[in-house]
Amino acid sequence: MARLLAIDYGAKRCGIAVTDESQIVATGLTTVGTKELMSWLKNYWIKEEVELLVIGEPKRLHGEASDIESAIQEFIQQLQKEIEDISIVRVDERFTSKMAFEAMIQSGISKKKRRNKALIDEMSAAIILQDYLYNQK
């Protein structure tokens, strides 16, 4: 089987998570600057077999789209031009940053490391991907 890849898209940086080849476990992979995301994905697509890209869908509390959604839509349109065979699904990402921060506290990560927003973005991507996996069963 091929891997699944997830993105927690942000204005400055994007968290990236990936599954194992059996598509059972999602783990944080890295954080990439938003400006570098397209080239990073194209390179990753060449190196690894990826079946699906899961992109977080940021929504406000009552379900309306957040301000960054228009940038995400533009990114998706460009990505579909750059990588023709890409399959993309969207997953509601409400509260993933809060969940990632809480997971860091529960796992005993130091306060200094919890201030690392890149780590929170990476963990958020893993939560988005794990949520997708859970809801596919």
Image (spheres, grey):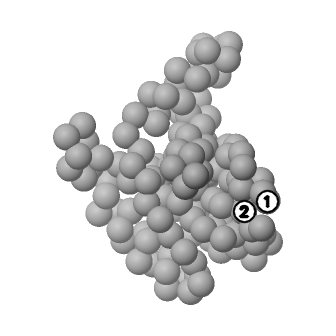
- Image check: 56 left or right of 25? left
> Please, what secondary structure does the residue beneath circle 2 have?
strand
In the image, residue 7 above or below residue 73:
above
Residue in view at x 59 percent, y 15 percent:
105
Which residue is nearer to you in this view: 6 or 133? 133
Q: Amino acid at mark 2?
A: Arg
Percent position (x, y) of residue 82? Answer: 55, 83
Percent position (x, y) of residue 74? Answer: 36, 71
Pick the quarter of the image with the N terminus.
bottom right
In the image, residue 42 above or below residue 91:
below
Which residue is nearer to you in this view: 43 or 93? 93
Residue in view at x 35 percent, y 63 percent:
71
In the image, residue 87 above or below residue 16:
below
Residue corresponding to mark 1: 21
Q: Can residue 29 be seen by looking at this rendering?
A: no
Kindly check if marks 2 and 1 are in contact, taking CB atoms under 8 A apart as contact: yes
